[in-house]
Amino acid sequence: MFKSPILLASGTAGHADELDPYVPLREIGAIVVKSMSSFEWAGNKAPRLRPTNAG
């Protein structure tokens, strides 16, 4: 059981510290990650986060 039902979907929280002014991180139940592996791969090119007028 999680302490909180709030789960952040992969890719929606940046490094999570961007959300701290809005939601204290201790109130987040979990951050759902993308695929994990025991081997390295290149991943997506930066920038992976982009500012928008909507926030």
Image (cartoon, grey):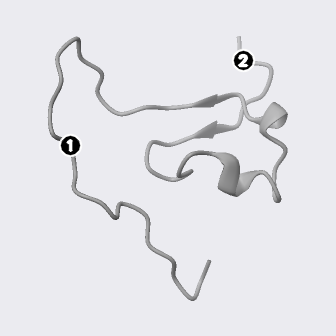
- Rounded to the nearest angstrom, the CA distance separating label 2 from label 1 is 29 Å
Sequence-earlier tag: 2 or 1: 2
Image: 50 above or below 49: below
Q: Is residue 40 left or right of residue 6?
A: left
Lateral position of residue 19 relative to residue 33, left or right = right
In the rendered image, residue 31, in percent from the top left (x then y), is placed at 57, 33
Q: Which amino acid, by three-letter code, is at mark 2?
A: Phe
Relative vertical location of residue 23 with respect to residue 42 in this rendering, above or below = below
**What quarter of the picture does the N terminus occupy?**
top right
| Residue 19 spot, x, y in % from top left | 71, 54
Q: How far across and how far down the image is residue 14, in percent? A: 53, 52
- What is the quadrant of residue 53 in the picture? bottom right
User: Mark 1 = which residue?
Assistant: 43
Q: Position of residue 2 (x, y in %)?
A: 72, 17
Q: Which residue is mark 2?
A: 2
Helix, strand or loop at disc 1?
loop
Give the amino acid at mark 1: Gly
Q: Residue at x 59, y 84 (%)?
A: 54
Left or right of 26: which side holds 45?
left
